[in-house]
Amino acid sequence: MKAGSNLEKVLTAGHFAFTGELGPPRGTDAEEVRKKAAFLKGNVDAVNITDNQTAVVRMASWAACIILIQEGLEPNFQMVCRDRNRLAMQADILGAYAHGIRNMLCLSGDHCQFGDHPQARGVFDIDSMQLISMVKKMRDEGKFLGGADLEHPPQIFIGAAANPFADPFEWRVHRLAKKINAGVDFIQTQCIYNMEKFRKYIQQANDMGLTEKAYILAGVTPMKSVGMAKYMKNRVPGMDVPDDIIARLQGVAKDQQAEEGIKIALEQIEEFKEMKGVAGVHLMAIEWEHKVPEIAERAKVLPRPTVE
């Protein structure tokens, strides 16, 4: 065991992992975090806490992670390279670990111009590959990035994100390989809607032996409406929403589109369970945390395994 987190234990034991996500509030209301956490408790193995997602200011990821621990859930601490230099990153990692955080997702972060402070200066002192290597160096070598010894190294289960769909598609699996070579233990992918393209991606990853070196969790986000599907297709960079998904949602009454979106997600999860190289699902129910218990139940992933 590298970190001994629940997520690591579940994956190491060979169970099909099921993780969730929680967006912190745009304010100081800890109760909002607790309310969302209540829907996730017992239904997922770990909960990603986003870090100023889409470059919009929110409660700090590490702070919401601590609230989650207090509520009896395991967090996956997300950190973006956009907002901190290497000093602040290492300091936050030490503090997060000291408070019981054992999983971490290393991300570049969306550019500031997409958020609510477009005039902000992005830091990007190091990139996501270097962040992965830095955390691994801290954990496995007991060294800071600058080379000094680190007392009581943080035992962190290291994760990263992967987008199987951005152009050029044939390069995506090689970028995955770079992250795995940098030291990730698990990967959570971008939301998947183009299943045909994802099958090719995971086949390439299998052929290159990558799925034997890191656990791949497939990203799933249920569509709430045709409007959401069109927005994600046309306005979200790197998202690949096939026309047949939009046509399927358009084919049902407006008040049934959310249910149809959930059905599509459930069909995906069933396929991922049988797909070689996929070790689990990362469910990103964006501001739809209250739907997670229903989706987990209908996806037949309950009860979640307990691994000592």
Image: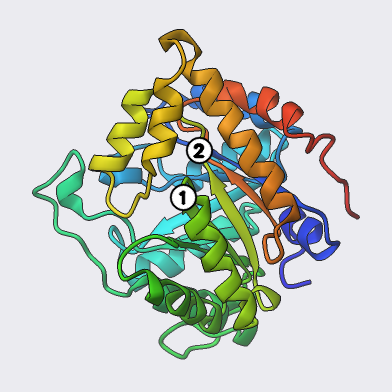
Quadrant location of residue 65?
top right
Q: Which quarter of the figure is the C terminus placed in?
A: bottom right
In the picture shown, does residue 263 fall above or below 54?
above
| Residue that carries the numbered disc 2 in the rendered image | 221
Of circles 1 and 2, which is in front?
1
Could you say which disc has been placed on residue 65 in the image? none
In the picture shown, does residue 285 fall above or below 249?
below
What's the CA distance linking mark 1 and mark 2?
12 Å
Q: Residue type at mark 1?
A: Asn
* Left or right of 59, for residue 4: right
Nearer to the camera, 18 or 221: 221
Residue 16 seen in render: yes
Label 2 neighbour load within 10 Å: few <14, some 14-19, many 20+ = some
In the image, residue 73 lies at what x, y percent?
A: 69, 39
Nearer to the camera, 104 or 100: 104
Quadrant location of residue 303?
top right
* Left or right of 219, for residue 153: right
Identified at 47% across, 45% down, the residue is 193
**Residue lying furthest right in this view?**
308
- Secondary structure beneath label 2: loop
In the image, residue 108 lies at what x, y percent?
A: 35, 63
Could you say which disc has been placed on residue 194 in the image? 1
**Residue lying furthest bottom in this view?**
147
